[in-house]
């Protein structure tokens, strides 16, 4: 895993397109972290005593994920063409939000306030991607997430 992350970190984007490429590389990397470890999500993060990961799994799974992303992007481009339409983000309760525009796609993130500890469940991604370096930073993230979900819930 260190080799893949080191390779991604050493890539220095020279323009916005290359920044987007690096972001996709990080998405692919984060998508394989659980599969390349002795962790499992069922639904919360935990250890699996029976899981064995072979030495070549990280590179093989990373290559597969990169190919999946590239395929998905080709399908989207073929279906929708090059789209320079700006996206819009609204922080609101989807039950109450009033709008006058029709949208092609709406993504929501329901706050499962008591059902899932997002910070603990995604701590491996947060650590590897540099969002938290220690447990104190994870605690601060949990407090922030609680504030955001409470705000969204109201």
Image: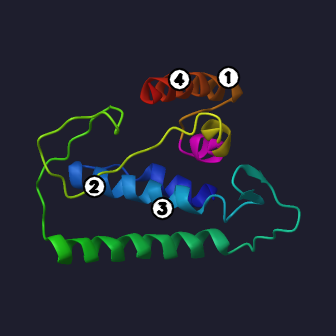
Residue 127 is a magenta residue: yes
- Percent across and percent down for residue 79 are 19, 76
Q: Where is residue 5 in the image (x, y as percent from the top left)?
A: 54, 54
Q: Is mark 4 on a helix, strand or loop?
A: helix
The first of marks 1 and 4 along the sequence is 1
Q: In the shown orientation, is residue 9 left or right of residue 132?
A: left
Viewer-closest of 93 and 109: 93
Label located before the other in sequence (1 or 3): 3
Q: Where is residue 104 in the image (x, y as percent from the top left)?
A: 20, 58
How far separated are the C-alphas under marks 2 and 4? 31 Å
User: Callout 2: helix, strand or loop?
Assistant: helix
Residue 137 percent across, percent down from the top left: 62, 25
Question: Of the numbered discs in the image, which one, if any, rests on residue 144?
Answer: 4
CB of mark 2 within 8 Å of CB of mark 1?
no
Residue 56 shown in magenta: no
**In this rendering, the label closer to the viewer, 2 or 4:** 4
Marker disc for residue 28? 3
- Could you say whether the residue bearing mark 3 is in a helix, strand or loop? helix
Report, in whole angstroms, how far the alpha carbon at label 3 lies from the one at label 4: 26 Å
Q: How crowded is mark 4: few (under 14 residues within 10 Å), some or many (20 or more)?
A: few
Secondary structure, mark 1, is helix
Q: Which mark is first along the chain, 4 or 3?
A: 3
Mark 1 and mark 4: Cα distance apart in space: 13 Å
Q: What residue do we see at 50% from left, 74% from top? A: 63
Which is more toward the observer, 3 or 95?
95
The secondary structure making up most of the magenta span is helix
Q: In which quarter of the image is residue 118?
A: top right
Q: Name the residue under label 1.
A: 136
**Residues in magenta, as a range:** 122-129
Q: Mark 2 points at which residue?
A: 18
**Callout 3 crowding tier (Cα within 10 Å): few <14, some 14–19, many ≥20:** many
- Mark 1–mark 3 Cα distance, whole angstroms, equals 27 Å
């Amino acid at each position: 895993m260190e080799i893949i992350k080191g390779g991604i970190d050493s890539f220095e984007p020279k323009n916005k397109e290359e920044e987007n490429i690096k972001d996709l590389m990080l998405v692919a990397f984060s998508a394989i972290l659980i599969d390349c470890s002795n962790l499992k999500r069922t639904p919360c993060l935990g250890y699996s005593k029976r899981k064995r990961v072979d030495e070549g799994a990280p590179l093989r799974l990373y290559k597969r994920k990169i190919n999946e992303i590239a395929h998905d992007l080709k399908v989207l481009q073929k279906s929708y063409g090059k789209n320079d339409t700006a996206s819009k983000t609204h922080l609101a309760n989807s039950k109450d939000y009033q709008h006058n525009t029709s949208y092609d796609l709406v993504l929501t993130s329901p706050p499962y306030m008591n059902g899932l500890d997002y910070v603990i469940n995604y701590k491996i991604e947060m650590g590897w991607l540099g969002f938290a370096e220690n447990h104190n930073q994870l605690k601060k993230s949990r407090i922030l997430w609680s504030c955001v979900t409470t705000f969204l819930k109201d």
